Image: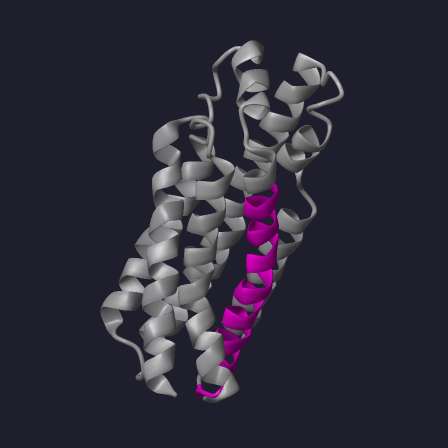
Amino acid sequence: MSLKKIGALAGIAFPILQMTAQGLIQVGGMEPAFADGTDSILAFFQNRDPSLFTIGEYLSVLSLVVFLWFLGALWQEFNSEEGENRWLVAIVLGSGLVTTSAISGAGGWALAMFRINENLDPQIARMLFDQGNLNFANTWVSYGSMVLAAGLLFNQSKNFPKWLGWSSLALAIGLFTARFFWTSQIAFAPYVLFWVWMIVVGINLYRRE
């Protein structure tokens, strides 16, 4: 199997790793709504399974390596094509790198769990909970930038279906809009669709190789 095929498969593996990680992190009860009280947020961290949370949080960070492999395969595919708007390839790559940096530099929830057995102050627990959620919401914008540039490139390419290009543009708008409504539960929907998008793109890249 070629390295490019592995990069394409990484597009499928990333959502799977993310779903697994979130499933482990959520063991003990779903997270409270953003508007819930401080006591509910502190109880959320107290009710986590320490071992499963640690594994889930590690998988979430580890998945960034997989995401970078997918990003490399996508960059190589776009660079192999002719076109006047090659600068869009740099936006795809740059947006992906910004996202990776933002996620790896966050860790509010992990810090809360690290100190949960040391009589973590409820207000600090809320701050770390909010910081983690806000950082996550901010990544929707950089994901949206990546999807937007990729969508424009898909529309110019002869190697990808046009519907993938147009659906990418629609998804980018959804991700940008979701950031405005980031405290609402429904704002999470475009990110779930982003997982589907990665799987679809990964399959198309795999078939291309």
Image vertical order of residue 192 relative to residue 184, above or below: below
Of the pair 24 and 6, the residue shown nearer to us: 24
> For this view, does 150 lie left or right of residue 52?
left
Magenta stretch contains residue 23? no
Q: Position of residue 166 (x, y in %)?
A: 28, 62
Residue 145, position as x, y percentages in the image: 49, 56
Magenta: main secondary structure equals helix
Q: Is residue 195 above or below residue 178?
A: below
Q: Is residue 59 visible?
A: yes
Q: Is residue 133 left or right of residue 203?
A: right
Looking at the rendered image, the quarter that the C terminus falls into is: bottom left
The residue sitting at 36% across, 69% down in the picture is 201
Which residue appears farthest toward the right when viewing the image?
Answer: 118
Q: Position of residue 26 (x, y in %)?
A: 47, 35
The N terminus: image quadrant = bottom left
**Of residues 61 and 114, which is closer to you in this image?**
114
Rendered residue at 35%/85% (across/down) = 208
- Name the residue located 60 percent from the left edge and 64 percent from the top edge: 65
| Magenta span of residues | 54-82
Height in image: 191 above or below 164? above
Q: Quadrant of residue 38?
A: top right
67 is within the stretch colored magenta: yes
Specify whether 125 is left or right of 183: right
Which residue is more in the foreground, 156 or 69? 69
Identify which residue, 183 or 153, lies in the foreground. 183
Image point (61%, 53%), residue name: 61
- Can residue 84 be seen here? no
Residue 188 in the figure: left or right of residue 76 = left
Q: Is residue 55 above or below residue 149?
A: above
